[in-house]
Image: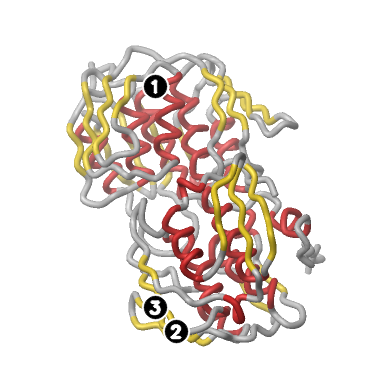
Amino acid sequence: MLISGAKNAALPELCAALLTADPVVLSNVPRLQDVATMLKLIRNMGVTAVRAEDDSVHIDASKLSSPEAPYELVKTMRASVLALGPLLARFGEATVSLPGGCAIGSRPVDQHIKGLQAMGAEISVEHGYIHARLPQGQTRLHGARIHTDMVTVTGTENFLMAAVLADGETILENAAQEPEIPDLAEMLIAMGAQITGHGTSKIRIQGVPTLHGVDHRVVADRIEAGTFLCAVAATGGDVLLKQARADHLEAVIEKLKAAGVEVAAVEGGIRIRAQGPARVHLKAQSFRTTEYPGFPTDMQAQFMALNCMAKGASKVTETIFENRYMHVNELVRLGAQIQIDGKVALIEGGCHFSGAHVMATDLRASASLVIAGLVAEGETVVDRIYHLDRGYDRMEAKLAGIGAKIDRLKVAAA
Protein backbone atom coordinates (compact mmCIF):
# COMPACT_ATOMS: atom_id res chain seq x y z
CA MET A 1 0.00 0.00 0.00
CA LEU A 2 1.34 3.42 -1.00
CA ILE A 3 1.08 6.22 1.58
CA SER A 4 0.18 9.58 0.05
CA GLY A 5 1.76 12.94 0.68
CA ALA A 6 0.82 14.65 3.93
CA LYS A 7 -2.17 16.97 3.90
CA ASN A 8 -0.68 18.95 6.77
CA ALA A 9 2.50 19.54 4.74
CA ALA A 10 0.89 20.13 1.34
CA LEU A 11 -1.44 22.90 2.57
CA PRO A 12 1.25 25.23 4.02
CA GLU A 13 3.55 24.43 1.09
CA LEU A 14 0.89 25.52 -1.39
CA CYS A 15 0.74 28.79 0.55
CA ALA A 16 4.55 29.03 0.58
CA ALA A 17 4.45 29.13 -3.23
CA LEU A 18 2.84 32.58 -2.86
CA LEU A 19 6.17 33.92 -1.56
CA THR A 20 7.87 33.94 -4.98
CA ALA A 21 7.10 35.11 -8.50
CA ASP A 22 9.06 32.12 -9.86
CA PRO A 23 7.44 28.78 -10.77
CA VAL A 24 7.08 26.23 -7.97
CA VAL A 25 6.46 22.51 -8.48
CA LEU A 26 5.15 20.38 -5.61
CA SER A 27 5.14 16.62 -6.14
CA ASN A 28 3.41 13.87 -4.12
CA VAL A 29 0.45 16.19 -3.47
CA PRO A 30 -2.50 14.15 -2.13
CA ARG A 31 -5.88 14.27 -3.86
CA LEU A 32 -7.95 15.56 -0.96
CA GLN A 33 -10.86 17.93 -0.57
CA ASP A 34 -8.81 20.33 1.57
CA VAL A 35 -6.10 20.43 -1.11
CA ALA A 36 -8.73 21.13 -3.79
CA THR A 37 -10.10 23.95 -1.62
CA MET A 38 -6.63 25.46 -1.16
CA LEU A 39 -5.97 25.29 -4.90
CA LYS A 40 -9.27 27.05 -5.54
CA LEU A 41 -8.34 29.65 -2.94
CA ILE A 42 -4.97 30.57 -4.46
CA ARG A 43 -6.42 30.53 -7.99
CA ASN A 44 -8.96 33.07 -6.78
CA MET A 45 -5.99 35.32 -5.95
CA GLY A 46 -4.77 35.29 -9.54
CA VAL A 47 -2.34 32.38 -9.13
CA THR A 48 -1.97 29.74 -11.83
CA ALA A 49 -2.07 26.27 -10.23
CA VAL A 50 -2.23 23.19 -12.45
CA ARG A 51 -2.49 19.64 -11.12
CA ALA A 52 -0.82 16.99 -13.28
CA GLU A 53 -1.70 13.30 -13.56
CA ASP A 54 1.44 12.34 -11.60
CA ASP A 55 0.14 14.05 -8.40
CA SER A 56 2.32 17.11 -8.92
CA VAL A 57 1.05 20.68 -8.82
CA HIS A 58 2.66 23.44 -10.90
CA ILE A 59 2.21 26.91 -9.37
CA ASP A 60 2.93 30.35 -10.83
CA ALA A 61 2.20 33.23 -8.43
CA SER A 62 3.85 35.91 -10.59
CA LYS A 63 0.46 37.51 -11.24
CA LEU A 64 -0.83 37.37 -7.67
CA SER A 65 -3.46 40.09 -7.69
CA SER A 66 -5.94 39.70 -4.85
CA PRO A 67 -4.58 39.20 -1.31
CA GLU A 68 -7.90 37.95 0.01
CA ALA A 69 -9.23 34.59 1.25
CA PRO A 70 -13.03 34.99 1.27
CA TYR A 71 -15.38 33.11 3.58
CA GLU A 72 -17.14 31.17 0.85
CA LEU A 73 -13.83 29.51 -0.08
CA VAL A 74 -12.45 28.83 3.41
CA LYS A 75 -15.50 28.10 5.54
CA THR A 76 -14.77 24.34 5.52
CA MET A 77 -10.99 24.52 6.08
CA ARG A 78 -9.11 25.89 9.07
CA ALA A 79 -5.80 25.77 7.18
CA SER A 80 -6.90 28.80 5.17
CA VAL A 81 -5.31 30.98 7.86
CA LEU A 82 -1.96 29.82 6.45
CA ALA A 83 -2.40 32.30 3.61
CA LEU A 84 -2.08 35.20 6.06
CA GLY A 85 1.69 35.17 6.59
CA PRO A 86 2.76 34.69 2.96
CA LEU A 87 0.32 37.31 1.63
CA LEU A 88 1.43 39.85 4.21
CA ALA A 89 5.12 39.17 3.49
CA ARG A 90 4.78 39.28 -0.31
CA PHE A 91 1.94 41.74 -0.85
CA GLY A 92 2.12 43.94 2.25
CA GLU A 93 -1.54 43.30 3.09
CA ALA A 94 -3.98 40.43 3.48
CA THR A 95 -7.64 39.86 4.20
CA VAL A 96 -8.43 36.34 5.40
CA SER A 97 -11.76 35.05 6.64
CA LEU A 98 -11.79 33.48 10.06
CA PRO A 99 -11.53 29.80 9.12
CA GLY A 100 -13.86 26.83 9.52
CA GLY A 101 -13.16 23.09 9.49
CA CYS A 102 -13.79 20.17 11.83
CA ALA A 103 -15.82 21.06 14.93
CA ILE A 104 -13.39 19.42 17.36
CA GLY A 105 -12.77 22.35 19.64
CA SER A 106 -11.27 25.81 19.86
CA ARG A 107 -8.24 26.52 17.70
CA PRO A 108 -7.97 30.29 18.15
CA VAL A 109 -6.06 32.43 15.67
CA ASP A 110 -5.07 34.94 18.33
CA GLN A 111 -1.57 33.43 18.46
CA HIS A 112 -1.16 34.11 14.73
CA ILE A 113 -2.30 37.69 15.19
CA LYS A 114 -0.01 38.40 18.16
CA GLY A 115 3.02 36.97 16.36
CA LEU A 116 2.46 38.95 13.16
CA GLN A 117 1.83 42.10 15.18
CA ALA A 118 5.20 41.56 16.85
CA MET A 119 6.69 41.60 13.34
CA GLY A 120 5.13 45.01 12.67
CA ALA A 121 1.79 44.17 11.09
CA GLU A 122 -1.32 46.23 11.81
CA ILE A 123 -4.19 43.78 12.30
CA SER A 124 -7.89 44.12 13.01
CA VAL A 125 -10.68 41.55 13.13
CA GLU A 126 -14.00 42.81 11.78
CA HIS A 127 -17.12 41.15 10.38
CA GLY A 128 -15.54 37.71 10.46
CA TYR A 129 -12.34 38.72 8.64
CA ILE A 130 -8.73 39.25 9.67
CA HIS A 131 -7.41 42.43 8.04
CA ALA A 132 -3.62 42.75 8.09
CA ARG A 133 -1.36 45.35 6.52
CA LEU A 134 2.04 46.95 6.86
CA PRO A 135 2.15 50.42 8.42
CA GLN A 136 2.19 53.31 5.96
CA GLY A 137 5.68 53.82 4.53
CA GLN A 138 6.86 50.35 5.58
CA THR A 139 7.62 47.84 2.80
CA ARG A 140 8.55 44.76 4.83
CA LEU A 141 7.82 43.04 8.10
CA HIS A 142 10.67 43.14 10.62
CA GLY A 143 12.26 40.38 12.64
CA ALA A 144 11.03 39.69 16.14
CA ARG A 145 11.26 37.24 19.01
CA ILE A 146 7.94 35.37 19.13
CA HIS A 147 6.98 33.16 22.08
CA THR A 148 3.49 31.74 21.69
CA ASP A 149 1.31 31.02 24.71
CA MET A 150 0.65 27.54 23.34
CA VAL A 151 2.28 25.22 20.84
CA THR A 152 0.59 25.92 17.51
CA VAL A 153 1.46 24.10 14.29
CA THR A 154 -0.23 26.50 11.88
CA GLY A 155 1.05 29.45 13.90
CA THR A 156 4.63 28.21 13.61
CA GLU A 157 4.14 27.70 9.87
CA ASN A 158 2.63 31.16 9.40
CA PHE A 159 5.50 32.81 11.25
CA LEU A 160 8.06 30.82 9.25
CA MET A 161 6.56 31.96 5.96
CA ALA A 162 6.22 35.58 7.07
CA ALA A 163 9.72 35.78 8.55
CA VAL A 164 11.66 34.53 5.52
CA LEU A 165 11.04 37.87 3.73
CA ALA A 166 11.21 40.10 6.82
CA ASP A 167 14.02 42.52 7.68
CA GLY A 168 16.39 41.03 10.23
CA GLU A 169 16.21 37.94 12.41
CA THR A 170 13.09 36.26 13.77
CA ILE A 171 13.29 33.76 16.61
CA LEU A 172 10.36 31.41 17.19
CA GLU A 173 10.22 30.03 20.73
CA ASN A 174 7.84 27.29 21.85
CA ALA A 175 7.67 26.32 18.16
CA ALA A 176 5.79 23.21 17.09
CA GLN A 177 8.01 20.27 16.10
CA GLU A 178 5.70 18.14 13.93
CA PRO A 179 7.50 16.63 10.89
CA GLU A 180 5.47 18.77 8.51
CA ILE A 181 7.26 21.87 9.85
CA PRO A 182 10.80 20.72 8.97
CA ASP A 183 9.40 19.69 5.57
CA LEU A 184 8.08 23.23 5.02
CA ALA A 185 11.37 24.70 6.27
CA GLU A 186 13.38 22.55 3.87
CA MET A 187 11.21 23.75 1.00
CA LEU A 188 11.77 27.38 2.04
CA ILE A 189 15.53 26.81 2.40
CA ALA A 190 15.61 25.36 -1.12
CA MET A 191 13.90 28.59 -2.24
CA GLY A 192 16.71 30.65 -0.69
CA ALA A 193 15.50 31.17 2.89
CA GLN A 194 17.89 31.11 5.84
CA ILE A 195 16.42 28.91 8.60
CA THR A 196 18.01 26.91 11.41
CA GLY A 197 16.58 24.90 14.30
CA HIS A 198 13.51 23.60 12.46
CA GLY A 199 12.31 20.41 14.10
CA THR A 200 13.14 21.83 17.54
CA SER A 201 11.24 24.21 19.83
CA LYS A 202 13.47 27.15 18.84
CA ILE A 203 13.72 28.23 15.20
CA ARG A 204 15.84 31.08 13.83
CA ILE A 205 15.02 32.78 10.54
CA GLN A 206 17.21 35.41 8.90
CA GLY A 207 15.12 37.36 6.39
CA VAL A 208 16.22 37.58 2.75
CA PRO A 209 15.16 40.04 0.01
CA THR A 210 13.53 37.50 -2.31
CA LEU A 211 12.91 33.79 -2.78
CA HIS A 212 13.17 31.79 -5.99
CA GLY A 213 11.29 28.82 -7.41
CA VAL A 214 11.73 25.22 -6.30
CA ASP A 215 10.79 21.61 -7.01
CA HIS A 216 9.78 20.01 -3.71
CA ARG A 217 8.35 16.60 -2.80
CA VAL A 218 5.73 16.58 -0.03
CA VAL A 219 6.62 14.30 2.89
CA ALA A 220 4.55 11.13 3.41
CA ASP A 221 1.43 11.46 5.57
CA ARG A 222 2.20 10.05 9.02
CA ILE A 223 -1.46 10.15 10.09
CA GLU A 224 -2.61 8.18 7.04
CA ALA A 225 0.17 5.68 7.76
CA GLY A 226 -0.82 5.48 11.44
CA THR A 227 -4.46 4.97 10.50
CA PHE A 228 -3.61 2.03 8.26
CA LEU A 229 -1.32 0.59 10.94
CA CYS A 230 -4.33 0.55 13.29
CA ALA A 231 -6.53 -0.96 10.58
CA VAL A 232 -4.10 -3.84 9.98
CA ALA A 233 -3.64 -4.32 13.74
CA ALA A 234 -7.42 -4.58 14.12
CA THR A 235 -8.00 -7.09 11.34
CA GLY A 236 -4.71 -8.95 11.13
CA GLY A 237 -2.45 -9.13 8.14
CA ASP A 238 1.03 -8.55 6.74
CA VAL A 239 1.29 -5.22 4.93
CA LEU A 240 4.06 -2.94 3.68
CA LEU A 241 3.20 0.76 3.89
CA LYS A 242 5.33 2.23 1.13
CA GLN A 243 6.92 5.66 1.72
CA ALA A 244 5.75 5.68 5.37
CA ARG A 245 8.27 7.10 7.87
CA ALA A 246 8.64 5.12 11.09
CA ASP A 247 10.66 7.95 12.63
CA HIS A 248 7.58 10.17 12.36
CA LEU A 249 5.34 7.68 14.21
CA GLU A 250 7.46 6.54 17.13
CA ALA A 251 4.81 7.13 19.83
CA VAL A 252 2.13 5.24 17.87
CA ILE A 253 4.46 2.38 16.92
CA GLU A 254 5.58 2.02 20.54
CA LYS A 255 1.95 1.51 21.61
CA LEU A 256 1.27 -0.94 18.78
CA LYS A 257 4.30 -3.02 19.74
CA ALA A 258 3.22 -3.02 23.39
CA ALA A 259 -0.20 -4.22 22.23
CA GLY A 260 1.38 -7.20 20.52
CA VAL A 261 1.80 -6.07 16.91
CA GLU A 262 5.03 -6.53 14.96
CA VAL A 263 6.00 -3.20 13.37
CA ALA A 264 9.39 -2.43 11.79
CA ALA A 265 11.02 0.24 9.67
CA VAL A 266 12.19 -1.35 6.43
CA GLU A 267 13.70 -0.02 3.24
CA GLY A 268 11.02 2.00 1.51
CA GLY A 269 8.48 2.14 4.33
CA ILE A 270 6.98 0.39 7.38
CA ARG A 271 6.15 -3.33 7.64
CA ILE A 272 3.35 -4.43 9.96
CA ARG A 273 2.45 -8.01 10.85
CA ALA A 274 -0.56 -8.72 13.07
CA GLN A 275 -2.19 -12.08 13.78
CA GLY A 276 -5.73 -10.71 14.26
CA PRO A 277 -8.43 -10.43 15.25
CA ALA A 278 -7.43 -7.80 17.79
CA ARG A 279 -9.80 -9.02 20.53
CA VAL A 280 -7.94 -12.33 20.59
CA HIS A 281 -4.32 -11.33 20.08
CA LEU A 282 -3.86 -7.74 21.29
CA LYS A 283 -3.69 -6.07 24.69
CA ALA A 284 -5.35 -2.66 25.12
CA GLN A 285 -3.01 0.31 25.70
CA SER A 286 -3.61 3.47 27.69
CA PHE A 287 -2.21 6.72 26.28
CA ARG A 288 -2.32 10.48 26.57
CA THR A 289 -2.33 12.80 23.57
CA THR A 290 0.18 15.60 23.50
CA GLU A 291 2.26 17.69 21.12
CA TYR A 292 4.82 15.99 18.86
CA PRO A 293 6.83 13.87 19.51
CA GLY A 294 4.15 12.59 21.91
CA PHE A 295 1.08 10.58 20.94
CA PRO A 296 -0.76 12.62 18.27
CA THR A 297 -4.32 13.78 18.85
CA ASP A 298 -4.94 12.96 15.18
CA MET A 299 -4.44 9.26 16.04
CA GLN A 300 -6.58 9.20 19.17
CA ALA A 301 -9.86 8.07 17.58
CA GLN A 302 -8.24 5.36 15.45
CA PHE A 303 -6.33 3.86 18.38
CA MET A 304 -9.43 4.08 20.57
CA ALA A 305 -11.27 1.88 18.05
CA LEU A 306 -8.40 -0.61 18.32
CA ASN A 307 -8.56 -0.48 22.14
CA CYS A 308 -12.27 -1.30 22.01
CA MET A 309 -11.39 -4.64 20.39
CA ALA A 310 -8.20 -5.49 22.29
CA LYS A 311 -8.16 -7.42 25.58
CA GLY A 312 -8.39 -5.50 28.85
CA ALA A 313 -9.35 -2.04 30.02
CA SER A 314 -7.61 1.14 28.89
CA LYS A 315 -7.68 4.87 29.57
CA VAL A 316 -7.33 7.57 26.93
CA THR A 317 -6.65 11.17 27.94
CA GLU A 318 -7.20 13.88 25.32
CA THR A 319 -5.26 17.06 26.14
CA ILE A 320 -5.30 18.94 22.82
CA PHE A 321 -8.94 19.49 21.76
CA GLU A 322 -11.91 19.62 24.11
CA ASN A 323 -14.47 18.17 21.68
CA ARG A 324 -12.52 15.27 20.28
CA TYR A 325 -14.66 12.46 21.68
CA MET A 326 -17.56 12.92 19.26
CA HIS A 327 -16.79 9.54 17.69
CA VAL A 328 -17.49 7.77 21.00
CA ASN A 329 -21.27 7.68 20.62
CA GLU A 330 -20.92 6.21 17.14
CA LEU A 331 -18.48 3.53 18.33
CA VAL A 332 -20.96 2.70 21.11
CA ARG A 333 -23.63 2.20 18.43
CA LEU A 334 -21.35 -0.46 16.99
CA GLY A 335 -20.97 -2.18 20.36
CA ALA A 336 -18.10 -0.41 22.13
CA GLN A 337 -18.08 0.03 25.91
CA ILE A 338 -16.73 3.53 26.60
CA GLN A 339 -17.32 5.96 29.46
CA ILE A 340 -16.34 9.62 29.19
CA ASP A 341 -15.31 11.71 32.19
CA GLY A 342 -14.12 15.12 31.01
CA LYS A 343 -10.86 14.65 29.14
CA VAL A 344 -10.67 10.95 30.00
CA ALA A 345 -12.23 8.01 28.14
CA LEU A 346 -12.42 4.66 29.95
CA ILE A 347 -12.66 1.72 27.55
CA GLU A 348 -13.56 -1.89 28.29
CA GLY A 349 -11.93 -3.96 25.58
CA GLY A 350 -12.82 -7.25 23.94
CA CYS A 351 -15.99 -5.98 22.27
CA HIS A 352 -17.60 -7.73 19.30
CA PHE A 353 -18.47 -4.89 16.94
CA SER A 354 -21.81 -5.33 15.18
CA GLY A 355 -22.41 -3.52 11.89
CA ALA A 356 -24.71 -0.50 11.99
CA HIS A 357 -25.44 2.80 10.30
CA VAL A 358 -23.12 5.44 11.82
CA MET A 359 -22.30 9.08 11.15
CA ALA A 360 -18.88 10.69 10.85
CA THR A 361 -18.52 13.85 12.91
CA ASP A 362 -15.01 14.91 11.92
CA LEU A 363 -12.02 13.75 9.88
CA ARG A 364 -10.31 11.34 12.28
CA ALA A 365 -13.62 10.19 13.79
CA SER A 366 -14.62 8.95 10.35
CA ALA A 367 -11.41 6.91 10.13
CA SER A 368 -12.12 5.26 13.50
CA LEU A 369 -15.56 4.18 12.26
CA VAL A 370 -14.03 2.65 9.13
CA ILE A 371 -11.59 0.67 11.28
CA ALA A 372 -14.43 -0.59 13.49
CA GLY A 373 -16.48 -1.44 10.41
CA LEU A 374 -13.66 -3.56 8.99
CA VAL A 375 -14.03 -6.07 11.85
CA ALA A 376 -17.73 -5.63 12.68
CA GLU A 377 -20.11 -8.52 12.08
CA GLY A 378 -22.42 -7.62 9.21
CA GLU A 379 -22.50 -4.40 7.23
CA THR A 380 -21.45 -0.98 8.51
CA VAL A 381 -22.46 2.17 6.64
CA VAL A 382 -20.54 5.36 7.45
CA ASP A 383 -22.44 8.52 6.56
CA ARG A 384 -21.03 12.01 5.89
CA ILE A 385 -17.76 10.72 4.47
CA TYR A 386 -16.97 14.16 3.11
CA HIS A 387 -15.10 14.43 6.42
CA LEU A 388 -12.98 11.44 5.36
CA ASP A 389 -12.23 12.97 1.97
CA ARG A 390 -10.73 16.02 3.66
CA GLY A 391 -7.75 14.00 4.86
CA TYR A 392 -7.55 10.56 3.20
CA ASP A 393 -6.63 10.05 -0.43
CA ARG A 394 -8.95 7.35 -1.84
CA MET A 395 -9.05 5.38 1.42
CA GLU A 396 -11.60 2.84 0.24
CA ALA A 397 -9.51 1.96 -2.83
CA LYS A 398 -6.36 1.50 -0.74
CA LEU A 399 -8.12 -0.72 1.80
CA ALA A 400 -9.81 -2.76 -0.92
CA GLY A 401 -6.38 -3.26 -2.46
CA ILE A 402 -5.20 -5.15 0.64
CA GLY A 403 -8.29 -7.29 1.08
CA ALA A 404 -10.98 -5.16 2.75
CA LYS A 405 -14.60 -5.49 1.66
CA ILE A 406 -15.34 -1.81 1.31
CA ASP A 407 -17.18 0.30 -1.27
CA ARG A 408 -18.08 3.95 -1.70
CA LEU A 409 -21.83 4.26 -2.15
CA LYS A 410 -23.43 6.76 -4.47
CA VAL A 411 -26.48 8.22 -2.75
CA ALA A 412 -29.22 9.60 -4.96
CA ALA A 413 -30.18 13.20 -4.35
CA ALA A 414 -33.44 13.67 -2.44
Image depth: mark 2 or mark 1 in front = 2
Say few, some or many: other residues with alpha carbon within 10 Å of mark 2 (under 14 / 14 to 19 / 20 or more). Answer: some
Residue type at tag 1: Arg
Q: Position of residue 65 (x, y in %)?
A: 50, 22
Q: Residue at x 34, y 75 (%)?
A: 343
Corner quadrant of residue 366: bottom right
Q: Position of residue 238 (x, y in %)?
A: 69, 59
User: Of label 2 and label 1, which has the lower sequence position?
Assistant: 1
Tag 2: amino acid: Ala
Residue picked out by circle 1:
90
**Residue at 32%, 45% in the rendered image:** 176
* Count of marks placed on residues: 3
Residue 35 or residue 68, whichever sits in front = 35
Secondary structure of the residue carrying tag 3 is strand
Q: Measure the C-alpha gap from mark 2 to mark 3.
A: 7 Å
**What residue sits 54% from the left and 66% below the top?**
302
Q: Are marks 1 and 3 in contact (CB under 8 Å)?
A: no
Q: CA distance from mark 1 to mark 3?
A: 47 Å
Assess whether mark 3 and mark 2 are in contact (beta carbons under 8 angstroms).
yes
Q: Nearer the viewer, residue 128 or 16?
A: 16
The first of marks 1 and 3 along the sequence is 1
Instruction: Please determine whether, in this image, residue 25 is positioned above or below residue 246.
Output: above
- In this view of the protein, can residue 366 be seen by the observer? yes
Q: Which of label 1 and label 3 is nearer to you?
A: 3
In this rendering, the answer to whether 389 lies above or below 86 is below
Secondary structure beneath label 2: strand
Q: CA–CA distance between discs 2 and 1?
A: 53 Å
Q: Secondary structure at mark 1?
A: helix
Q: Are marks 2 and 1 in contact (CB under 8 Å)?
A: no
Report x, y in % for residue 239. 68, 55
Report the front residue among 414 and 341: 341
